[in-house]
Image (cartoon, grey):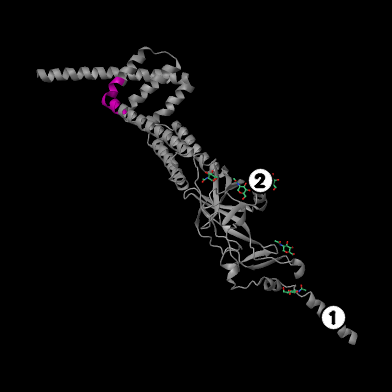
Amino acid sequence: MLSGVVLLLLLTDVVNTEGNCSYQDVLNHLNLKKDNELFSMTRPVKNFRTPTRVSLEVLLYAILDVVEKDQKFIPYVWTVTRWNNEYISWDPAQFCGINNVSLPTEVLWKPDLTIEEMTEKDKAPPSPYLTINNKGVVEVQNDQVLVSTCRMHIYKFPFDTQSCNLSFKSVIHAAKDIRLQASDNSSEATEWSREVMRTQYEWLFINMKVTARNATDLEDQDIIVYTINMKRRSILYIVNFLLPVLFFLGLDLASFLISDSGGEKLSFKVTVLLAITVLQLILNEILPASSNRIPLIAVYCIGIFGLMLLSLLETIFVMYLMERDSQDNEANGDQSGIEDCNRQDKALNNSDREVNKWTRCACIYDVTTGETPAEQLPVAKEGSSSSTKLNEEYQTLDKLSHELREMEKTLSQLLINSKAEYVAG
Ligand SMILES: *[C@@H]1O[C@H](CO)[C@@H](O)[C@H](O)[C@H]1NC(C)=O
Ligand SMILES: *[C@@H]1O[C@H](CO)[C@@H](O)[C@H](O)[C@H]1NC(C)=O
Ligand SMILES: *[C@@H]1O[C@H](CO)[C@@H](O)[C@H](O)[C@H]1NC(C)=O
Ligand SMILES: *[C@@H]1O[C@H](CO)[C@@H](O)[C@H](O)[C@H]1NC(C)=O
Ligand SMILES: *[C@@H]1O[C@H](CO)[C@@H](O)[C@H](O)[C@H]1NC(C)=O
């Protein structure tokens, strides 16, 4: 019983001697309190001439959006910033081997890094904690959805690759206060980004390049530029845009097979042309108005539009010519038709060609008697297939027409005679 109490006392003694095992003990040792202005107000260096070396690591989690129209690039990045705080250090051996502690971000000084291209404040709250280690290195990790501007080159749209810059720099501190350096090189940044990349929508990540622009003058600022190269997945644009335009051109060409008579061909062509116009409107939505070079896709669209316009004009012109032709025929058509067929009567033989000609003449005769050409069409077609049968009909018709002409002659003779009698009377 007594030995038990002694053991317990011994144990508590051991705990007490090994007592600096909580994070709070570390903070007590550092004298780090929430309202300790030594830590949060000023740059943590013992001599103001020593610059704070800030190292930066950026990983790309996702390319969320690329808006060509607004020249906007929205990546989701993960940044790790590290720097040294000269007031922080402890011996892990004295504190149960604790070598790092997490703290709320506001208790310590932080470099005022910003991204030049950023146009909107990050809506997500910054990470609430930072980590300090026993050597005085402070580390802040942050997830950010960056809304940044990026000059896009859309000349080759939709087969384009874009490169967008994210330039990190301090807002007010010059190089004499803060020296920026990248802790990863281009190949590492690319490889790690590939590993953590979660989603790639329209854009395929190619690589990330890290460029350090060290200030030569200490009054200047160090800038680290992360250039993200990416390629557009163009397959949907091919399927949804380029091919339909081509199909419409095919349709327009096919419409040459539609007969010129009647307005169907014309309205068909106009419809196809309107379809292209709709696609062009969609294209207008996608492409920015700021591009000073006309994108190839716009040239493609306007080229096809021009071709269709030409074919439409051609149709209109042909229809106009046909209209005029038929008007001329109406004016002096009947007589010439009769004369034509009279000539053909003389050169009559049994060949199919002649039959066809003759049936055509028959049409003209029938037009004058009030029948439509459409009703005559089957006869003309039949003529070529069963020509011998038609030949017989043709000869009887020929006789008929001959008689008709004879009658006409006698009638006109009679008329002249009666006129003469009338005049004489
Ligand atoms: C615990 O920390 C205090 C204050 O820093 C120190 O005086 C004491 O020696 C430490 N105890 C041990 C066991 O390291
Ligand atoms: C923090 O300390 C823990 C335990 O000692 C260790 O596993 C971890 O890697 C440390 N983290 C950093 C960032 O040093
Ligand atoms: C991006 O940064 C690189 C390196 O500084 C520079 O050469 C390039 O012109 C920049 N691109 C844009 C679009 O600003
Ligand atoms: C990048 O860093 C890694 C390791 O630090 C090294 O192996 C590689 O050669 C470096 N690449 C370049 C391009 O400097
Ligand atoms: C910029 O400075 C860092 C160290 O501060 C150095 O590693 C890097 O090579 C320098 N870059 C250039 C382009 O001078």
The residue under label 1 is 10
Q: Position of residue 74 (x, y in %)?
A: 54, 53
**Residue 274 in magenta?**
no
Horizontal side of residue 50 vs 316, given as left or right: right
| Residue 22, picture quadrant | bottom right
Disc 2 within 8 angstroms of ligand 4 (CB): yes
Which badge, 2 or 1, is on the more N-terminal residue? Answer: 1
Q: Amino acid at mark 2?
A: Ser
Q: Is residue 402 in view from this perspective?
A: no
| Local secondary structure at mark 1 | helix
Could you give the CA–CA distance between mark 2 and mark 1, rounded to whole angstroms? 57 Å
What is the magenta range? 326-336
Instruction: Specify the label residue 187 is tagged with.
Output: 2
Measured as percent of width and height from the top left, residue 132 is found at 67, 64
Taking depth in this image into account, of 393 and 194 the one nearest to the observer is 194
Image position, residue 170 (x, y; %): 54, 56
Check the image and report above or below for 393 versus 206.
above
Q: Nearer the viewer, residue 183 or 89?
A: 89
Of 347 and 396, nearer the camera is 347
Is there a contact, CB below 8 Å, between mark 2 and mark 1?
no
Q: Which mark is residue 55?
A: none
Q: Give, as a three-letter code, the residue at label 1.
A: Leu
